[in-house]
Image: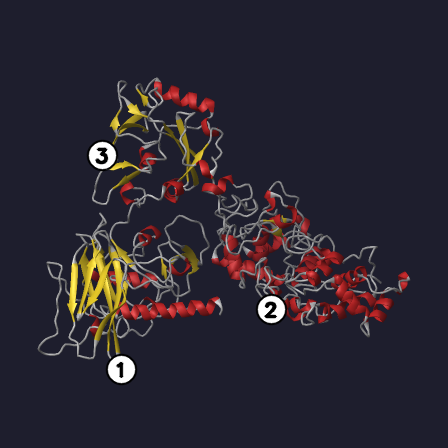
Amino acid sequence: MTTHTLKNMRRQLMLITCCTLLAACGNDSSSEAVTNSGTGSNTDTDSGNKQTLLLNPRIQLTQGLTTTKQYTLTATQELRLIQPGSQGNASVQGDTFTYQANADAQGSDHVKIAIISNDKIETINWLIRVNKPSPRFTTLALGDSTKDKVWQCVADTQTHQGVVWATPLQPTSQTYAWGNWPPTLPAFQAQCQFSESDDNSQACTTDRLVEYANQQSWCGRNDWRLPSSYEMKKLISEQDYALDNNQAAIDPYFFAPTGFETYWLADDDGQPHSDNVAPTLDFATGRYATVMANKRKPKSAMLVSGVKRDTTLPAEQEKPQAEQDSFIRLDNDGQPLAKSLQDSDYSDNPWRCLDDMRGLVRDNLYLRDNQFSNVYWLTPDPQDNSNTNQVLSIQVDVPAIIADINQAQYCGRNNWRVPTTDELAMLLYKGEQKSDYNLLYTTSLNQPKSGDYWVKKTAGYGLYSLPTMTDLHTKVATDTDTARILLIATEFEQRASEDPRSVNNHSKPNFNHLRQAYASNSDHWPPAFVDDELSYQELGLMPKPSFPHTNPYNERKVSLGEKLFFDPVLSQAGDVSCSSCHDPKLGWGDGQEVSIGHDRQRGKRNAPTIVNSAFLPTLFWDSRAATLEQQALMPIQDPVEMAESLPNLLSRLNAHPQYPALFKQAFSEGGINSDITEQQLGMVLATFQRTIISNTSRFDTFVSQADSAGDTSALSDKELWGLDIFRRNGRCVNCHMGAEFTDHKMQNVGLTYYQGFYEDLGLYNIDGKPSSVGKFKTPSLRDVMNHQPWFHNGLLDTMEGVISMYSAGMADNAPFGWNKYDPTYPVLSKQIRPLNLTVEEAQALQAFLTTITAPTRQKPASRTELALN
């Protein structure tokens, strides 16, 4: 069963669940709520007039309280508990259903009971929301009669800003494109309805949705907007159920159950990305997964009203993670202690050094400073009575102690300092019942004591007292004040940024000036935007392939190599040939993400084209072959590809009715008349592959005409602009340079999937060097539009997607936590930087790529084409 099939089945299951829990399918009137009595007991006996059986009852219940429901049964009917739930104790006795909420429960519970008779089963699905004494959510009237069966408002009473949500009851039936994407453009597929008379003239976009909600004053409010990632994630509850443990969930009592829905977010994360994508919260990819999505693709939406939540306030912090998941204990040299020693005491040092690997810290500092942050803490031993624990003078002791610590380079660092109030706040937590601010992680922080702590202010020092009921206000320090000292050190890893030469240089050029700039020999073209340390080769015309003196060209070798290339005789099962993965009709690739080989096994990498393989100094994505002769024999022996041994194959070839004679003819000039050898097999296959070269492209014509006559008419304005972007703003020539549009080097483009299911370590598997993790060969871009899908794993099959990823700077996953100390953690190549291309630039760049793509050669090049006459 395929992943796609499983996903569809799970989506269908979620839609069924949505209908069951919210009665959103068809507005089932039988799902009216059961009212809970003030005592916590709800006995509703069917007596007198027969009542309709509620198949989807819904009820809110306070922690620790009980609800009961008595059913009228016939002599042949039995009430039975089918699914007990998780937030309380459900039971059935006779004709009565009882549910008692746990004292510490919070969230929605799904309990299933059934009335069973000889010929019928009536299933009753209870949705029970267990609240604290003060419930978090309450529903509000929408105030829009045309939409009140499609949307509802939910007030979050635990937020100090009074946030209200507008949530769709059927998110999959109300979808939107992001922003103001025009519905007349291609691929606009969002579907919604803003009024009963709506003729779809109004686009189903999030901008229109926000405008409509504010015009109608939903729930009496007119400040509706898309939520931020932080606000959306604050709705997620660990106690509410999802389809599996890897998914996030939002309380299904008030919100539509989240299965595989994706919700649009406000584009206010401060992250650089291309113009055609926007952020989403994707419930299909796991908890808290924020991903970028194409703006035109239909997604669900929620709206939020109220002041944006401040992510830096300690009151907004979640409950702390387990301490072992929050800090790494370091030794005096700044290296992590063995994991078996992470909980041990410091008996030889009055200070404890911690690497703070909490995502909260990193996110907060990143949001504030627009940088990746590494944070370290130095906390004293509370049993130490020296002045390292309690500092008396801010004019003498504080600077002196910090100077001594930095001179000694505690934990291998010399940048220790007193934290600011905001930084100290990252170690604080304010209880849910508005209790005191206090320090978290007491074990890791060496059992900190209550009292005053030094904090750094804009001018001088201040005191902050713990615990406290107030906000984070500091006292002005005097020379006689006493306070405890806790030190911080921070590293800011500047993210790769746009090339300064292209900043503010993204507007459409003057095309007359652009043509003048390129109407000459390429030596006189505008300077390319390449990094200083690179040895740059300008783009140009393809040379002719050379044939090694150890394997010179002859036509008989080419003909024999071609015959073998298309013959499945090379494989163990006789059903896979070289052309199975390198089909000339598919650009000498196979058009698959990864290839299918022996016994229908899936390979791990995308099959590269053999076009222009004559010019490659190494072969395969990981460069494990140095010559085409070596490369030609490797797929034959690979257990996933052809799965044949060379001795078996040679025996089969030597017994073949045709091949022995053909080999003798191919090698007659060398006087070889013995049996076919593996060397000969590699030579004929390699000779054939060297004849598969690119045809002349429009770019080649452009270069020739511009050089000889200053004629640039071979390229349109858009394509010429694309050439300029390729060389300059797009920085493509940093890797894709020269006549072959490649530097022939190994680069890491961020697709290693390190320690993940799809992990591929690339060159590291060949040479074992830590610096080689995730490196793959830079492919030639000659004929690139004939060779989709792209990347070593066939990740993307649209060039729009490829350009968008590079424009965003690829996946720059800076090491964090334990990964910082991993010598094999993959490092993104320095040449990759955010490009921030506009939509027009991306389109022009793609247009240029079509000019370096010629029709695929279907047969070997002739002697004349190879310049061998």
Residue at image location 48% in from the left, 58% down from the top: 839
Horizontal side of residue 829 vs 342, given as left or right: right
Tell me if mark 3 has few (under 14), some (14-19) or many (20+) residues whose alpha carbon lies within 10 angstroms of its own.
Answer: some
Name the amino acid type tagged 1: Asp
Mark 2 or 1, nearer chain start: 1
Name the amino acid type tagged 3: Thr
Horizontal side of residue 758 vs 396, given as left or right: right
Q: Give x and y (percent) for residue 35.
A: 14, 64
Question: Which element type, helix, strand or loop, lies under badge 1?
Answer: loop
Judge whether residue 96 can be spotted in this image: yes
Residue holding disc 1: 119
**Residue 868 versus residue 244: which sits nearer the camera?**
244
The disc at residue 475 is none
Mark 2 or 3, nearer chain start: 3
Question: Which element type, helix, strand or loop, lies under badge 3?
Answer: loop
Which dot, 2 or 1, sits closer to the camera? 1
CA distance for labels 2 and 1: 48 Å
Horizontal side of residue 310 vs 544, given as left or right: left
Mark 3 or 1, nearer chain start: 1
Residue holding disc 2: 600
Contact? badges 2 and 3 (CB < 8 Å)? no
Judge whether residue 217 can be spotted in this image: no
**Residue 848 versus residue 50: which sits nearer the camera?**
50
Question: Which element type, helix, strand or loop, lies under badge 2?
Answer: helix
Q: Give x and y (percent) for residue 478.
A: 26, 20
